[in-house]
Image (cartoon, rainbow, N blue to C red):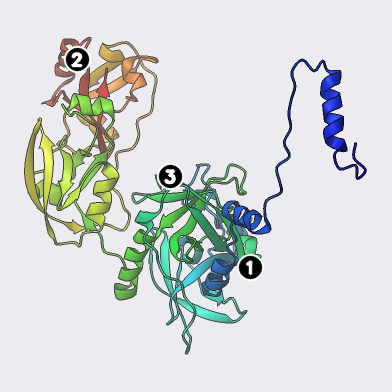
């Protein structure tokens, strides 16, 4: 032990080791402490500060307060939110959730976020933040309150563009290229959680291209920066202070932040905002088909090597696709100059093409490629007719593949609200645990094709299924207003 006692811990450790037996000699080397500059560099590399970025961007972020009149005896509820019945609980619904007061119109208030994208006073936020508003008040970072008007909104993408009444140029933020964003990149979310005012949270991009089943244009960035009710419409920034997304939804089983948030990518936002600013509305192309996601089983049944492309499950009568000669079972692999790898690719390609434009579409039909020329129509605001609903298992009795098939009579057709031109075999029951049940067939389905052969009767369908026993079979099923392919092993 030295006079200073500085070596005492090493001596104590050595003694302790010796007391344990000391079979082998252990040597300790104390490393010198890092230099101050090196320590600071290491700290900055693992714990960067975003203070400068936030300081530049914060003046462009605004708080939005909304007042609206609620009709007599009604109120906002879970069923009125964008994701009814799902654990995806959008930010804003709880601000308006009140017990009904029959007979008396009510005033309700809510709060959200937004950001200025133009020095002339244009503000981007979510549609659900300002939908139905009687009055919109925007509070700037310096505390000033301004009235705002809605220039235009897009419920399908959940975006709105506001204009502030100002005579001066305001601080604003720019859009970044969201296609360049990578999983693991730092992100900064700024917003108005629970109406508390401008707040900052930091995280990373957890995933890209998330489909949360909120609509036909789901293509979210998933981020883990904490977000809560009131962050809706706020910007998600990169480390340069540019906008890569708009906070829109959270996955929230308990109503609070659990580290899973979703933002609309900035490239999608910029396209919508441009149209809202120019026209006050968004015009999207319409093909007139129902699309279905390809999986390996469907791809194999259609003779495809890989499940790439957009499978057309149904061609809507008198629509652009019907007039151009598209058929159910076509797999779209190219739309104009864009490669199509999935149903979502085709959805966005069509939506981003102006109505009335003619496009050459490459499809695979019966194993051969062909090109169809189509003039797009304009997509309806309700957004219906794009995706076939997912299949669900059900119960029934024994039959080929576990199906019981009966004739599709006029009375059954009327009961199911099917058009007169629909022909096929009606599924009366599905045996639990059968191949048909495992692949989601259910009573009320109408089998209109088996292995690309049109079906006109239950006997014809039963015979075709019997011939396919032991093999994979491709069914085309009509379900209500939708149509989908089912590959059954």
**Element class at badge 2:** helix
Residue located farthest toward the front when viewing the structure as drawn = 2
Q: In the image, which is nearer the foreground, mark 2 or mark 3?
A: 3
- Please state if 445 lies on the left or on the right of 331 as rendered: right
In terms of image quadrants, where is residue 92? bottom right
Give the residue at mark 3.
212
Q: Is residue 118 visible?
A: yes
Give the residue at mark 1.
197
Q: Residue 64: percent from the left, percent from the top?
A: 55, 70
- Number of labels in the image equals 3
Q: Residue 345: percent from the left, percent from the top?
A: 27, 47
- Please state if 380 lies on the left or on the right of 303 as rendered: right
Q: Indicate whether 108 appears above or below 296.
A: below
Give the residue at mark 2.
465
Other-residue count near label 3 (Cα within 10 Å), few / some / many at <14 / 14–19 / ≥20:
some
Residue drawn at (25%, 12%) of the image: 400
Q: Indicate whether 182 appears above or below 110.
A: above
Residue drawn at (74%, 18%) of the image: 24
CB under 8 Å between discs 2 and 3 = no
Q: Nearer the viewer, residue 122 or 48?
A: 48
């Amino acid at each position: 032990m030295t006079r200073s006692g500085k070596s005492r811990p090493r001596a104590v450790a050595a003694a302790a080791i010796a007391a344990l037996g000391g079979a082998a000699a252990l040597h300790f080397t104390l490393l010198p402490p890092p230099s101050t500059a090196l320590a600071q560099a290491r700290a900055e590399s693992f714990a960067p500060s975003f203070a400068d970025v936030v300081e530049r961007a914060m003046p462009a972020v605004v708080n939005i307060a909304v007042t609206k009149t609620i009709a007599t005896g009604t109120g906002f509820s879970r069923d009125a939110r964008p994701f009814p019945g799902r654990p995806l609980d959008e930010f804003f619904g709880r601000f308006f959730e009140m017990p009904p007061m029959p007979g008396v119109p009510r005033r309700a208030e809510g709060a959200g976020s937004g950001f200025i994208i133009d020095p002339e006073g244009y503000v981007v936020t979510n549609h659900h933040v300002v939908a139905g508003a009687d009055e919109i008040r925007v509070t700037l970072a310096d505390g000033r309150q301004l009235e705002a008007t809605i220039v235009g909104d897009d419920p399908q993408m959940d975006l709105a563009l506001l204009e502030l009444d100002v005579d001066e140029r305001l601080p604003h933020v720019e859009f970044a290229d969201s296609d360049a964003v990578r999983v693991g990149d730092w992100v900064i979310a700024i917003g108005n959680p629970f109406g508390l005012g401008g707040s900052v949270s930091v995280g990373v991009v957890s995933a890209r291209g998330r489909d949360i089943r909120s609509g036909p244009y789901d293509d979210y960035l998933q981020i883990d920066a904490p977000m809560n009710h009131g962050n809706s419409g706020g910007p998600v920034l990169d480390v340069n202070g540019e906008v890569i997304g708009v906070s829109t939804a959270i996955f929230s089983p308990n109503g609070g932040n659990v580290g899973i948030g979703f933002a609309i990518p900035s490239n999608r936002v910029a396209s919508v905002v441009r149209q809202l600013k120019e026209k006050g509305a968004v015009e999207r192309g319409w093909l007139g088909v129902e699309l279905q996601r390809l999986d390996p089983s469907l791809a194999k049944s259609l003779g495809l090597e890989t499940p790439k492309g957009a499978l057309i499950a149904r061609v809507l009568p008198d629509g652009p696709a019907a007039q151009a000669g598209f058929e159910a079972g076509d797999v779209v692999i190219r739309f104009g100059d864009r490669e199509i790898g999935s149903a979502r690719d085709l959805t966005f390609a069509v939506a981003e093409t102006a109505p009335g434009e003619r496009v050459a579409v490459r499809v695979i039909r019966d194993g051969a490629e062909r090109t169809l020329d189509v003039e797009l129509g304009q997509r309806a605001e309700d957004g219906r007719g794009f995706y076939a609903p997912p299949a669900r298992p059900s119960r029934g009795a024994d039959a080929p593949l576990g199906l019981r098939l009966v004739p599709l009579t006029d009375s059954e057709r009327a009961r199911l609200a099917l058009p007169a031109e629909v022909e096929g075999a009606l599924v009366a029951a599905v045996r639990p645990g059968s191949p048909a049940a495992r692949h989601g067939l259910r009573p009320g389905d109408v089998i209109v094709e088996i292995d690309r052969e049109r079906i006109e009767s239950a006997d014809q369908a039963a015979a075709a299924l019997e011939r396919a026993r032991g093999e994979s079979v491709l069914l085309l099923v009509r379900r209500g207003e939708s149509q989908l392919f089912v590959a059954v092993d």
